[in-house]
Amino acid sequence: MSQRDGNSESHLAAIVSSSEDAIVSKDLNGIIQTWNRSAERMFGYTAEEAVGRSITIIIPEDRLAEEETVLTSIRAGVPIEHFETIRRRKDGTLIEISLTVSPIIRADGVIIGASKIARDITEQKRLQRAAEEGSRMKDEFLALLSHELRTPLNTVMGYMRILRRDDLAPELRERALDAMERNSASLTQLVNDVLDTSRIVTGKMRLVLAPVSLPQIIADAIETIRAPAISKGVQLELHMGGSLEVIGDEDRLRQVLWNLLSNAVKFTPEGGRVTLDAEVERGGVRIVVADTGIGITRENLPLVFQRFWQAEQGTSREYAGLGLGLALVRHIVEMHGGTIEAASGGRDQGATFTVRLPRSGTSVSGGSSGGESAGQRSEEDALSGDAAMRS
């Protein structure tokens, strides 16, 4: 062998050794011949442990047929390029790889084995799946938003056509105006929930802090949901005690209470009860909104504060809404330095939401405060916000 050949082989060996990709060679029976450092890092076996053993040590049982397919192609002199598959590490964990396999050809033209280059694509595939999931959720949300907007819009437009009639009875005119006002308010709430969510995600929500009398905003929230509660036959109970004052954003805290009470009434059937208890506790105020409604299953409980999440999905579900209300509540409460927890005994066992607010009204920016609770935030959003409650 010439010095040039020796230098070339040394150079090639150095490239193989330092490559970030796993480079492995095997004979036509699948027995490992060489195993570089990246293969050691990727699969967990040292070269001493791997060389001389079958390549099947890194192939999951349900993918063993792939090895015979690869060897068949190699024996025929056909390379395999960018084959995405799954392999198993020494510790049993699985890894997603992109595999390129080329024949090793002797000087006389005889194929004697295969050279395999494996690239870890686990993170790449994770990002791809995340993007696909994001796209799917966006499409589902747009379909849901279109459905939720269309329903009140159709009602408003229908009653507008009725109001154009000259012979319209006064009682029908009044009923039409009431329906238009009610559905217009629903449209406004939907749009503002979406806008508030956008403000939270982009870090543009701001609090205007001042002394707040909770009894007054509790009374305002109760009055707002009184009519739908009466129409459903849901009983409202209110219990307050102590000096219920905090430093906070009055409109945003009203939004919190309205959302919690509105949700409670929505998910409580006829004859049920919704209660609000507010009392002073050490260092702050505790507000508990409880209902005797449909409840929340154990598996769904950790999800209730996620944006766009609802137990029933799709446009045919029983309860309307975009699944934004509780997510907004959580962010606003945390911006005030408070916490919110959800609890339920399960299906048809009602639900309880407990809000704790500090008297000081310390604003939290970009993180959650307090301990772990059901629905604790799973992502880090920059939390700052502007605007008032829209009902």
Image: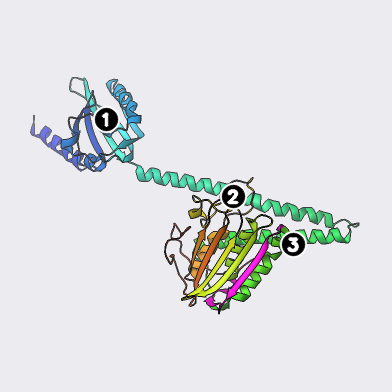
Q: Position of residue 314 (x, y in %)?
A: 60, 46
Badge 3 crowding class, 10 Å Cα cut-off, few under 14, some 14 to 19, many 20 or more, is few
Helix, strand or loop for disc 3: helix
What residue is drawn where x is 86% and y is 60%? 171
Q: CA distance from mark 3 to mark 1?
A: 70 Å
Residue 391 in sight here: no
Vertical side of 199 occupied by 320: above or below: above
Q: Position of residue 191 (x, y in %)?
A: 63, 59
Q: Position of residue 277 (x, y in %)?
A: 58, 69
What residue is drawn where x is 47% and y is 44%? 132
Q: CA distance from mark 1 to mark 2?
A: 47 Å
Q: CA distance from mark 2 to mark 3?
A: 25 Å
Mark 1 lies on residue: 56
Vertical side of 378 occupied by 62: above or below: above
Q: Earlier in the sequence, mark 3 or mark 1?
A: 1
Badge 1 crowding class, 10 Å Cα cut-off, few under 14, some 14 to 19, many 20 or more, is some
Mark 3 lies on residue: 181
The region drawn magenta spans 232-251
Mark 2 lies on residue: 142
What residue is drawn where x is 66% and y is 61%? 188
The reply to whether discs 2 and 3 touch (Cβ–Cβ < 8 Å) is no
Q: Position of residue 337 (x, y in %)?
A: 47, 70
